[in-house]
Image (cartoon, rainbow, N blue to C red):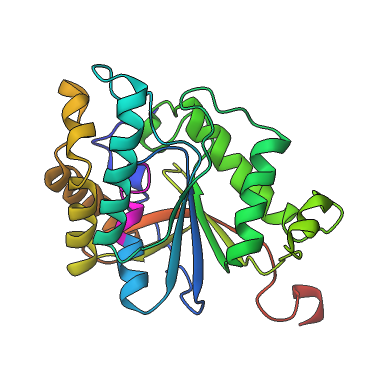
Amino acid sequence: MTTLDDASAFGAGSALPALPEDWERCLAVAAHPDDIEYGTASAVARWTAQGKQVTYLLATRGEAGIDGLHPDQAGPLREAEERAGAREVGVETVEFLDHTDGIIEYGPALRRDIVRAIRRHRPEVVVSGAFDVRMIGGMTNQADHRVVGLAALDATRDAGNRWIFPELAEEGLEPWDGVRFVCLAGSDRPSHGVDITGEPLERGIASLAAHAEYTKGLGAHGFEPRPFLTWAAGMAGPALGVEAAVLFDVHQLAFEGPPPWEQ
């Protein structure tokens, strides 16, 4: 098993390509407030600075995330922190699905909710989290993260099929098969990277810092935003040949140009 002080856990030593950026709209799908901020938000900052539109979709409000705070209080607090963190990286639209924190169930209801968002926002790129039991550095992935990451990947295909969740057509939501890439953060087998050197990383740090009450509630298990994100981005950078990077396992859903057998 790799360890967190092993650079290869972050893809260092590999020759990874940069994620293509010839697109305009992205939907970032996560289980909880703060999930996107542990790295991906820095890539989001780069993209919004380029004029791209990024929307956040959260399956829960993170109401079970603070041991010392009742869910009725934690949910609104964490929602507010997520909206503040999103603004730090240029994201204005943050939506919540109100699934139950800690016990999100994989199935048609979750997939339908994500499909609804995909058909409404019509992204070309969907970003979510890795759904393996073990993630980067051999860490055990959390249950909600696994469920939402897999559902996000599956929903991108569902969104383009009018016979899956046909009831969405009654809401005026026509099929959307325009998702080109699904980018999964936290994988121990990344395939692409995004250069976040400089301002994008700084804005990503500010985004995670907006989750101050949540981080404080973690006690000894919490991470200080600047040292943690700087270290993680620096560990990932060599895989892309840059100072700081975020790495993704990218599922390409359509051929770019003619398929190989026609070339």
Residue 124 image offset from top left, x and y in percent: 58, 69
Name the residue rendered at 14%, 39% in the picture.
Answer: 224
Residue 104 image offset from top left, x and y in percent: 55, 28
Side of 48 relative to 222 (left or right)? right
Q: Magenta part mainly helix, strand or loop? A: loop
Nearer to us in this view, 207 or 60? 60
Name the residue rendered at 31%, 66% in the picture.
Answer: 90
Q: In which quarter of the image is the C terminus?
A: bottom right
User: Does the magenta portion include 144?
Assistant: no
Nearer to us in this view, 62 or 227? 62
Side of 234 relative to 149 (left or right)? left
The answer, for residue 2, to whether it is visible in the render is no
Q: In this view, does 59 lie above or below 230?
A: above
The picture quadrant where one finds residue 74 is top left
Q: In this view, does 92 lie above or below 51?
A: above
Residue 210 image offset from top left, x and y in percent: 20, 47
The image shows a total of numbered marks equal to 0
Q: In which quarter of the image is the N terminus?
A: top left
Name the residue rendered at 64%, 45% in the picture.
Answer: 113
The answer, for residue 232, to whether it is visible in the render is yes
Residue 40 image offset from top left, x and y in percent: 36, 54
Q: Is residue 77 above or below residue 159?
A: above
- Magenta span of residues: 35-42
Nearer to us in this view, 73 or 50? 73
Name the residue rendered at 24%, 60% in the picture.
Answer: 88
The picture quadrant where one finds residue 182 is bottom right
